[in-house]
Amino acid sequence: MAHIASEPTWQRGDDASVTLSGSWNLLVDRRHRRTLLQGLAGIDAPRRCRWDLRHVDALDSTGALLLWQAWHGRLPDRIEWSDDQRHLFRRLADTPRLSPPSRAATPSRLERFGSGIVAVLQTAGGMCVLAGQLLLDI
């Protein structure tokens, strides 16, 4: 009998604990992922909480990244997890941060003018080739 994935959920305890359960993976739809991230982002000082991941049915890199974002890119001080989860988050922690892509320089007026001239010449050249082929076909 097939195992049906349960919705990912989290619950905040009275003792500054956060318990996660369900399947935290790519199969979670985008809106639910966004809702989870917004809810987790509302936790004050998430790294100081005690996180319990022992009730998570499935955790893939997408779910780990969602939690990583909620933790502001650093592991919490107190966390209870399986060996596989620890390995996944350690690998995520060792991944270098990507720098934002650089913006392409805006072309100057002279470059835009030159590009326009080249485009006109290419069009005129194409028209000459077309006219020549038409003359050959007649």
Image: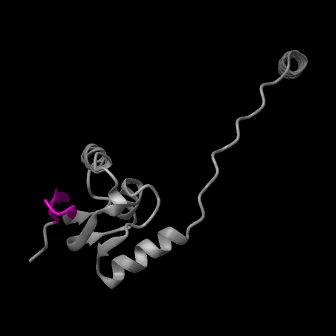
- Asked where in the image residue 98 lies, by quadrant, the reply is bottom right
**Horizontal side, residue 128 vs residue 36: left or right:** right
Measuring from the top left, give residue 31's x and y in whole percent.
27, 43
- Above-or-below relation of 6 to 3: above
Q: Is-magenta flag for residue 14?
A: yes
The tally of labels here is 0
Which quadrant holds the C terminus? top right
Q: Nearer the viewer, residue 14 or 38?
A: 14
- Above-or-below relation of 55 to 9: below
Which quadrant holds the N terminus? bottom left
The residue located at (46%, 75%) in the rendering is: 90
Measuring from the top left, give residue 39's x and y in whole percent.
25, 46
**Horizontal side, residue 48 vs residue 13: left or right:** right
The residue located at (35%, 68%) in the rendering is: 60
Q: Is-magenta flag for residue 81?
A: no
- Asked where in the image residue 69 lies, by quadrant, the reply is bottom left
Q: Nearer the viewer, residue 130 or 74?
A: 74
Residue bounds of the magenta highlight: 5-18
Q: Nearer the viewer, residue 89 or 128?
A: 89
The figure's colour scheme reads one colour
